[in-house]
Image (spheres, rainbow, N blue to C red):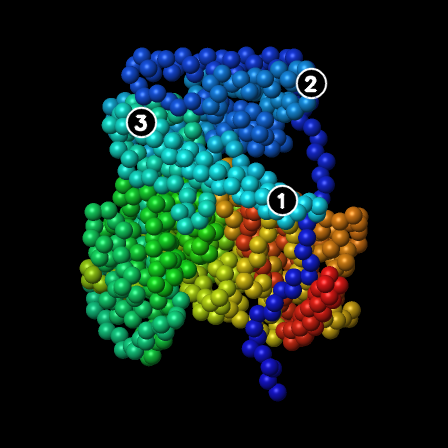
Amino acid sequence: MPPNHQFEYLPLILREHGPARFPQSVRQEDAITAANRNNRSSHTGNLQTSVTSASERWKTNQKDRAAHGLPSIESGIPLLLKIDTSLEIDDLRKYFEFEIVSEQEDGYVIVASEDVDLTIFQNKVSDFVGGIRGSSSVAKIHEVREDLTQQERLNLILTDSLIELWPTINDDSSYIVDVSVTCIGNWVVPPKPKRNPRWKDETWARKENTWSNERLEAYEKWDNLKDERMLGIHQIIDHYEAEILSNYDNTDEEALELPDSFTLRVEISGKGLKDLVFSYPYIFEVAEPDDIETPQQIERELKEISAQLDIQPPDTSAPTVCIIDSGIQENHIWLEPAIDDVSSRCFLPNVPTNEVADFVRPSGHGTRVAGAVLYGETVPKSGIVNLDTWIQNARVLDNNCGMPEKMLPAAVFNKIVKQYHLGKRQTRIFNHSINADAPCRNRHMSTWATTIDMLCNNYDVLVIQSSGNLRKTREAPRLGVSEHIANGRNYPDYLNENACRVANPAQSFQALTVGSIAYGAIEIEGWRSMAPETGHPSAFSRCGLGIWGAIKPEVVEYGGDFLFTESDPPDVDTPSVGRDVYPELIRSTMYGGPAFDSDEVGTSYAAPKVTRIAARLQSLLPEESCLLYRALIVQSARWPDWTSQLSRENQTEILRRLGYGIPDMARATSNTEYRTTFITHKERVLGPSDCHIYQVPIPSELRRPGDDYDIRIDVTLSYAASPRRTRRSPRGYLATWLDWISNRRGESIEAFLTRALKSDDDPSQEGAGTIGWTIESRSNWGQLPDVRRNVGTIQKDWAVVKSNALPDDFCIAVRGHQGWSRDPDTVASYTLAVSFEILGQEIPIYEPLLTAVVELESQVESETEVEVEIEG
């Protein structure tokens, strides 16, 4: 008799929620802070000397500017502080009324003070000498740096390439730079009042109304401050007759968002650039524009092709994928039935909006990407093909597959996502096979990447992002693969180099970043593939870790490989003899040639294969959050079999290169008798210090003492929160950040609840150690050294457990932590997936788990009804 189910996803049961209990850590006081506290007069003298000098120097500079006819600078002395890293950065605002321009590494913070005499800070320093209450934080300000030449500040706000260029900048030459300006101010949203039981309803309503008005007033002040900063920087730019090519702020007009910064792409003289950087105190980053590029391969000989196909268009309600790329050959035989041509648009400046074709020689780029979304690995050659996804065409790359300098990528990406998501089809999935031609920067999240994070958080969209490609050959400092090998860095070791790090905006926390793997080994006509076998990283695929140690790319797909010769230096290329290890792709026939072929490689073509899985998930789960689609894709990913023979240290390298592995359409979209996935339906929300606990009951027949089956457990948390660009840590970047913990071996649900939730009870020591997670939340806890699972917004871990060692109940606690926001209403949205798979398929597990979860669901509902009756 067939089962009365279709192997649906099973629900994760929310068993408890409440305030989270966090382990108490004993932190030893910083030695410098202790010395400052013990020798207050000396520390005070040093600080007062430094701030007096800074104040006088600033006043002198303003007089000199006026004398030379330069535009005045709004009050705001830039200061470089060295602080105790245990000091809450917000205390600088709270106690000293400093505005935080940007948080740096190793305890450095750039701040600005509107008080040109630094009176408030001077008073606090004086109070510290006298031991007056409220001044203890002065001990944690180790130095006000005497940065007379501003070289230290330059090192913190200029990118490495600009630091190198800075001494040679010519006053009369023209430069294009992206200037990022903070506009946080030194105020915050006041704490939301807590109701006193003795208050009357009118009293509570009045206090709530007062708080709401104060909150709106704070947001209005932030908005006004942004306008003031924009005007102030305009005065300097206009003085030097510079041109603002593009501007972008991190505000979403559709939602109440804090405009923490804005970015201007400016063309300005060297003299003006130096004055702007030295004089304007609220700049936290100056960068050269990214060189947007997706390399094209050698033009092939023209040949004709005919196809006997019956391609049926998608259903009207089918998912839609927006391809942000170089345009698409929309009348292509394999693509035309799926093109939503009404929405096609070109976003290039000075180009007609209806010029949406793929003009990239020799055979297109966006056209290939669109084909990979529709068909995956193999282009169908005959028969009836029923398409299940609509394709939208947003052209942003020119005929050379580049983006004009006048286009700020963040601004155009923001415009596209809003236009298509808020349009008729309410597009939720975006393929973005575009990267800068350089590794991402590690100081601040870029404007481009932050925009992706902001839009994913605000609109619940999913961005599938390529990790970026290394070139076949290139001169220093950004060496190509040929040069790496010639310099003794062989495949795959050169992928560890900083220059081979994922390219902007692949470091985005919310984007699902995709790297590339090879199809297999080949040796033919003097050419040999880099990869020794199937599933090894492609020679060109940029790798992680990402910014702040986040696991990037999260997944990989097949994108081909480079071939090389044994010459010195080696030739590195994609010759036609290697087509067996290149992906089969749709080609644009605008300039002739076949309609499909295996003649190009790249992460650009790996990414859309993951997009294809996302679209299938949307068709199966149309009402669910994109956070769940992302979670299920990552949940389905596995490393290739060859990695199991490697040492733990080498497996850490695999995590850098392959992320969590190769996603699988079947694992992501279905269950079997031997594999069961539990999910949270609809996205959940958590605020700081909140905790949700989920319970998966393990049936006794899966835990029999005599059985010794291998059970693989996968857990993936996928969440989103509001970002802030000016911070330089994963905790400070997000308004609220989340992590998860599980129960230990032998730890009951009751003991786990006590350990995870804050209560008067002492946590139990019940349990015999951890489940045995591969990565863990600390770099020295898991099986893989030097990595952590809880840095980014997609947090996966897995373990293989003997069936007789499974707990009675498997429990997961999702915990909220305070990030940059002090707004009590700030929350993070999340989804959670948990999978069990019996690797040897000795016994079926789906039916027993289904029965157990139905029983638990009924039990929890009964308990809830009893609680409601008691309260009533």
Residue located at (65% from left, 52% from top) = 691
Quarter of the image where one finds residue 343: bottom left
Q: Amino acid at mark 3?
A: Gln
- Mark 3 falls on what kind of element? helix
- Mark 1 falls on what kind of element? helix
Taking the image as shown, residue 655 lies to the left or right of residue 336, namely right
Q: Residue 486 in the image: x percent, y percent?
A: 39, 41
Residue located at (58% from left, 63% from top) = 680
Say which label, 3 or 2, has the lower sequence index: 2
Q: Which one is nearer the viewer's eye here, 175 or 139?
A: 139
**Alpha-carbon span between mark 3 and mark 2:** 44 Å
Q: Which one is nearer the viewer's eye here, 384 or 236?
A: 236
Query: Mark 2 — residue?
Result: 131
Query: Mark 3 — residue?
Result: 235
Q: How many marks?
A: 3
Q: Amino acid at mark 2?
A: Gly
